[in-house]
Amino acid sequence: MISVSYCSSSLFRSEPWFPHPLFTATVHLLPPDSGDGILVVLNPNLLQNWQWNQNPCSFSEITCKDSKISALDLSSILLASDFKSIASSLLSLERLESLVLKRMNITGNLSSASDSWCSEMLSELDLVENGLSSFVLDISRLSSCSSLKSMNLSRNLLGPLNGGKDKVWFQNETS
């Protein structure tokens, strides 16, 4: 069961490359034998150590378990993306347990999330300081992520929560 509390203050494509709305640069797909087949940005100004022909487990922003991506932290990398693109490409990584996307200029409405987009293993989702908008009832759509224990949506444009200035935390209550 997911509760809400408030306080103030493997995506594979056959083509070798394709433009993707998630990133403002050209995006490449790693071959299937290199982990989960995560999308890789080939923009040297954003992620210098990401190369399309390397295993994503060697990238500094990625943590792996058993050669599968288990955590991804792209904090402060300004990708100017919409939440629907993030949800459809990153939340569904098969073994993803933690996704931290702080201060990335992510916009859009949380209601665009779908049950099928969430990894069964996702337990932490951190979307602090983006441009996300939604109402509290829309946020509950993400509660279908069965392993989600913590979700931080602080400093977004959520309403009607004090004009988006309230912190929103989801904690998984175990019986």
Image: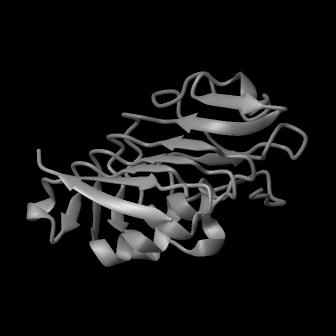
Q: Nearer the viewer, residue 161 or 17?
A: 161
Which color scheme is applied? Answer: one colour
Q: Is residue 3 visible?
A: yes
Q: What residue is rendered at 77% in x and 56% in y?
A: 10
Q: Nearer the viewer, residue 150 or 68?
A: 150
Q: Is residue 21 visible?
A: no
User: Along the horizontal axis of the image, is 122 left or right of 46?
Assistant: right
Q: Quadrant of residue 92?
A: bottom right
- In the rendered image, residue 157, in percent from the top left (x then y), is placed at 20, 61
Q: Nearer the viewer, residue 43 or 111?
A: 111
- Could you tell me how many numbered marks the image carries? 0
Q: What residue is rendered at 56% in x and 74% in y?
A: 114
Q: Quadrant of residue 50?
A: top right
Q: Quadrant of residue 108?
A: bottom left
Outermost front residue = 175
Q: Is residue 79 above or below residue 148?
A: above
User: Along the horizontal axis of the image, is 56 left or right of 105?
Assistant: right
Q: Quadrant of the C terminus?
A: bottom right
User: Along the horizontal axis of the image, is 112 left or right of 27?
Assistant: left
- In the rendered image, residue 126, in percent from the top left (x then y), is placed at 42, 45
- In the rendered image, residue 151, in percent from the top left (x then y), is placed at 42, 51
Q: What residue is rendered at 58% in x and 37% in y?
A: 72
Q: Is residue 175 above or below residue 41?
A: below
Outermost right residue = 33
- In the rendered image, residue 141, in percent from the top left (x then y), is placed at 46, 74
Q: What residue is rendered at 63% in x and 44% in y?
A: 97
Q: Is residue 163 above or below residue 75?
A: below
